[in-house]
Image (cartoon, grey):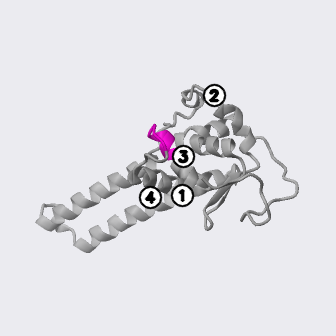
Amino acid sequence: MSVSSDSTAGDGFEHATEESVEPLSRDKIFHILQTQRRRDALRFLKETGGTVEMRDLAEQVAAWENDTTVQALTSDERQRVYIALYQSHLPKLESEGIIRYNKSRGIVERGPLADQFDPYLDTADESDYEVEMEDGESSDDETPWLRYYRVATAVGIAVVAAAWIGVPPVSFVPNIIWDVLIVASFTALSLAQLLTGDE
């Protein structure tokens, strides 16, 4: 594991001399902590301190998630967690000021707001995060957007198949119209996800 115990000028991050840290609301903290992978990532950063390589972070989170050791992980287990952290969870934590994430160099460190999460990371009963959420959001790692994309894909395949084999009334509409509608549905989903700022 590559861990640097102190931050230097060459660590790939720009550090302000004095950072004004506004406390986060309890709802905001629990919203961030509702996802197990985020909790594990913050826990790892708290335990190691300093700057860590994103690969090391992903491997440890995957090991905890699969109740095994880093050495015993399969490549699928590593890749599944790495991709989720890389594409979704770490950018989300960075955008909130909780971590510093240099994507191009693959390094991560605690940000100015990370200390506010420490008391919750020490909590043994992780079901507390679900109880405290007032908006009824699930703590599953699978986001609702993934389900939306799956439904859109299934509907698109069904429409294309029906048009291809000539099932009325689908076959009465020109194929170009179906193509445009399918592309438009994915475009709308992507824009909605982007505008809501969800992972």
Contact between labelled residues 4 and 3, with CB atoms less than 8 Å apart:
no
Which of the two labelled residues, at mark 2 and mark 3, occupies the earlier sequence position? 3
Q: Can residue 169 be seen from the camera position used here?
A: yes
Examine the rendered structure and indicate whether residue 34 appears above or below residue 103: above
Residue at (50, 61) in percent of width and height: 191
Foreground mark, 1 or 3? 3
Q: CA distance from mark 3 to mark 4?
A: 32 Å
Q: Callout 3: few (<14), some (14-19), or many (20+) C-alpha neighbours within 10 Å?
A: many
Q: Are marks 2 and 4 in contact (CB under 8 Å)?
A: no
Residue 86 — which label? 1
Tell me the number on the disc at residue 111.
none
The image quadrant that residue 122 belongs to is: top right
Camera-near label (2 vs 4) is 2
Label 2 sits on a secondary structure element that is loop
Give the secondary structure at mark 1.
Answer: helix
Residue closer to the observer: 87 or 29: 87
Q: Amino acid at mark 1?
A: Tyr
Q: Magenta part of the protein: which range? A: 60-69
The residue to which callout 2 is attached is: 123
Q: Tag 4's secondary structure?
A: helix
How far, Cα to Cα, is label 2 from label 4?
Answer: 36 Å
Q: Is residue 41 above or below residue 10?
A: above
What residue is shown with label 3?
60
